[in-house]
Image (spheres, rainbow, N blue to C red):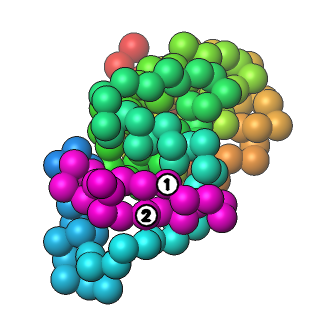
Amino acid sequence: MSDITFLVEEQKVYGHKALLGLRSEYFKTLFSSGMRDSSASEIFIPNVKYETFLEVLRYVYTGQVTVTSETAIGLLEASNFYKVEGLKAQCEYVLHLNIDLDSVCNLLEIADRFDARKLRQVCLEHLLDHYEVVTTSQAFQEMERELLVYVMKEACKRLNKT
């Protein structure tokens, strides 16, 4: 009874345009745009793993999915792309629970890349709380220039408040 088939890693995934459009701004726009994909019966999904896409759809259909530290980054990327905000929030929370001195720079970059604002703020606070240790790490030195500037500005703001 599906009216859309997604091709993900050469596997078919069946869906319902109306339901997908109700729970995802991306799908709503896709199916109502009048563009070629809005009337297509099959849509190729590049750059998303099959298992990740299934989890996104599971969340869209049921409102529930188990996000683990192993799946959180892939699901964060997909939920950001498909504009599934509830799933995105769950991913941010799971990643937040896993912040430590070794991961904070990487997670800050991920949060920045996928517009995960809460995660970005938590990472920034953790980084600033452990500034001397984190800023000497290789991961910090390899961060993108714009993000480094942002961290330095926030560090200066914190210093000026004290």
Q: Can residue 64 be seen in this view?
A: yes
Provide residue 105's location: percent of width, then percent of height: 65, 34
Q: Which mark is residue 5?
A: 2
User: Label 1, on which residue?
Assistant: 13
**Which quarter of the image is occupied by the C terminus?**
top left
Q: Are circles 1 and 2 on residues that touch, CB within 8 Å?
A: yes
Q: Does the magenta stretch include residue 105?
A: no
Q: In this view, does 107 lie above or below 53?
A: above
Picture quadrant where residue 139 is located: top right
For label 1, count other residues whose C-alpha is less than 10 Å away and answer few (under 14), some (14-19) or many (20+). some
Total marks drawn? 2
- Marks 1 and 2 sit apart, C-alpha to C-alpha, by 6 Å
**Which quarter of the image is occupied by the N terminus?**
bottom left
Picture quadrant where residue 8 is located: bottom right
- The residue at the point 40 percent across, 48 percent down is 80
| Amino acid type assigned to the residue bearing label 2 in the image | Thr
